[in-house]
Amino acid sequence: MKIAPGPADGARFASAWSDLATVGRDQQRGGYSRHAFDDAEMAMRSWFVEQAERRGLQVEVDRNANIWAWWGTPGPGALVTGSHLDSVPGGGAFDGPLGVVSSLLAIDELRVRGFVPSRPIALVCFVEEEGGRFGLPCLGSRLMTGVADADQVRRLHDPDGVNVADAARRVGIDPERFGPDPERVAMIDAFVELHVEQGRLLHAADPSAAVAVGSQIDAHGRWRFTFTGEGNHAGTTRPADRRDPMIPAAATVLAARRALVDHPDAVATVGRIVPNPGGTNVIAGSVDLWLDARVATSEATIAVVDAITAAARLEAEAEECTVVLRRESFSEQVIFDPNLGLQCAQILEAPMIGTGAGHDAGVLAPFLPTAMIFVRNPTGVSHSPAEHAEIADCVAGIGALADVLGRAGQADGDSRAVTP
Amino acid sequence: MKIAPGPADGARFASAWSDLATVGRDQQRGGYSRHAFDDAEMAMRSWFVEQAERRGLQVEVDRNANIWAWWGTPGPGALVTGSHLDSVPGGGAFDGPLGVVSSLLAIDELRVRGFVPSRPIALVCFVEEEGGRFGLPCLGSRLMTGVADADQVRRLHDPDGVNVADAARRVGIDPERFGPDPERVAMIDAFVELHVEQGRLLHAADPSAAVAVGSQIDAHGRWRFTFTGEGNHAGTTRPADRRDPMIPAAATVLAARRALVDHPDAVATVGRIVPNPGGTNVIAGSVDLWLDARVATSEATIAVVDAITAAARLEAEAEECTVVLRRESFSEQVIFDPNLGLQCAQILEAPMIGTGAGHDAGVLAPFLPTAMIFVRNPTGVSHSPAEHAEIADCVAGIGALADVLGRAGQADGDSRAVTP
């Protein structure tokens, strides 16, 4: 069944948006928890497939479980847009789904405008962009490009010990098919991802602008510190007899903040810490702590992490604990295709801004021209239930995406017209 | 079916002990996780009931879900022993179950000795001694004595948000019956709890002794600190714009350690910390942290907690966060009945030692004469999978418990002969 396309307006956006309002609510944390292959994310995927099929788009799931919906015959020269459906634990409504919903409504908008594409256009939903369940962000795009090794990915596990392979099988996805998909990557001439902004650089660049175009993504990564001491009874173990891994772990949280004094352009965060066993009356035997660090360049990021690691080692030694450091992910700085970005900025008369947030567009950037459109976030708050964007700005974002797709999609046989 | 009683020996102990070896294994943390009304604890309860019935003991479950097994007609003048079946998360095998298993085998031993009790003897399993699921230790004994309010207990909830009332109902226990049980308390003339030692004071007092008798329990309590800041994106929020509750939480962990410099007799521990939402790439919106603090006297304990709280408030303010402090439990210092203790020590020719660990015997102590028998723990490690006691020492503990029950249970009509 096809539905009549309509112009992007507040009512149409609100209607589509309300479909997702109740999917994956996190009663404990607030906001949403939608993670790869869980019930909430599967409901989101079903919703997308239904919406795409209603619009007469041809839906397929690639070997890495990313969903594609094609307007026109799938094939080379494709212009692709989309984002992700998953969230961080207790995240906001916009991060990810805004790009997916906007891609569907941009197709409607283009049809209202009478646009007929001269090249294939595809909408894509990438799997586990946040890494909220299995720890590795941009799982789907990393697998597709071969940046992540499929064997290693299959063995990643969630906090309950369920690995990626079993989680995928549970929902009928064959994890043995995971792996690089160079033919698919080669089909894509350009990828444009719309996303809610996750800061207030847009406001700083132009307080009157509802959208901006992305210029670069800071280098960023995740490091897991495992401090090991000796589990024991909290009531009967004298301070001198303790080897409590919570002590160096706590000191490392503070070291991460202190490191920013010497690195004023960096951010470093500990948002996740898990003592084992985690009992109130128990000295932990070990503590896992995750550090998220980002600075514009890879070298600067590594310098910050090195400073924090040095502090962690000293603190662990002082408590007679050990510390093991594992890098769970690392992304070099991404400079989005300057020509494509500049053209988007000209089409939209929008400012260009960088970001500290990682995106699938960043993973794809070394392989093909990519661009991002950011929608204004009045408070800048993201990864939080308080994340927000105004409906009028979301509608402006849909219009902007339609403008860019329309210009690029009508490129009259020259499939790289806006992606030189 | 009755089983032939046998003398306490290593083979009989090992056989009973092996029944429990696989119940409630924690695959993630190591050791055991057995918590009130969960599958593991229910399996432990069933095992105890079966063992008691095999011995011809009369089993009843009191209004607070504690299990009683009577040798002789239930009634006043009772001599009671027992302990608990639950564990801390990822705890050892001995803390709790050793006292229960020993109570059953002490009955066997007394029968082999031809002992005929002249007063009722009961074995008891108290519910949720560790507070590992619902946060309040000694739940069963606190309810029975009225130290904990039943309405408040019913509303306590586990980390998954399941409250005590619903958890009880799920396993067929009526939470509406929870409440003080003064008739039952009045029935008990003396309570003797056998427990693995959770430190090495026994070794210090007498390196050749396998058991000791308890003299006192330090005052101890649990305090929950909730730090609230502003949840946000770890990659895009500048340090100056952050209100990260992990910062004061980490500083409070270190303040708890520092406070012990001024209070050398105290212990203070943070073994549990939960950032919300707990994502790697998310600045937490709030952090819950639990402090366990213990010193001999109540005044000294409060002084330590006050010092840590003052530091927590300063650190929260510096990060523009708020902090709310809630006392989840508090137990005054317990001095066990000195006459009963001295008599036990004389019967057993054992040293007397104090402890920093809380016990149901401590909750009962203000209401009736109580004593504890501690079994040697060679490393002192407890609340850990590494917790250990030698079989020979466990057998010695069973013998000691039989000695004490035998002397007190034959008290020739004078039910207070060893409990003046």
Image: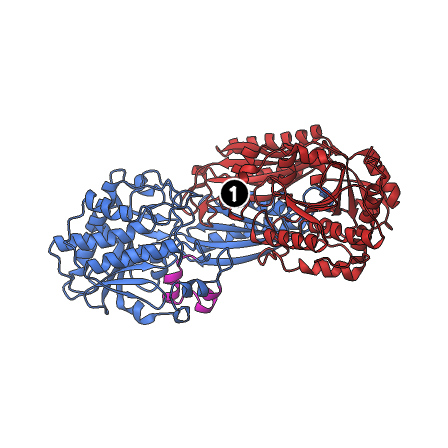
Chain colours: A red, B blue
Amino acid marked by disc 1: Arg
Residue drawn where x is 31% and y is 51% of the image = B97
In this rendering, is residue A336 above or below B41?
above
**Range covered by the magenta-colored residues:** B137-155
Image quarter of the N terminus of chain A = bottom right
> Mark 1, residues whose alpha carbon is within 10 Å: few (<14), some, or many (≥20)?
some
State the residue at coordinates (24%, 48%): B16
Question: In front here: B165 or B183?
Answer: B165
Find residue A72 and report its image quarter.
top right
Secondary structure, magenta segment, majority class? helix
Numbered-mark total: 1
Could you say which is closer to the camera, residue A352 or residue A272? A352
Dot 1 falls on a residue whose secondary structure is: helix
The answer to whether B186 appears left or right of B331 in the picture is left
Residue A358: tell me if it is visible: no
Residue underneath mark 1: B257
Q: Position of residue B136 (x, y in %)?
A: 44, 58
Q: Is residue A344 left or right of residue B119?
A: right
Relative height, residue A308 to residue B305 (above, below): above
Residue A417 in view, yes or no: yes
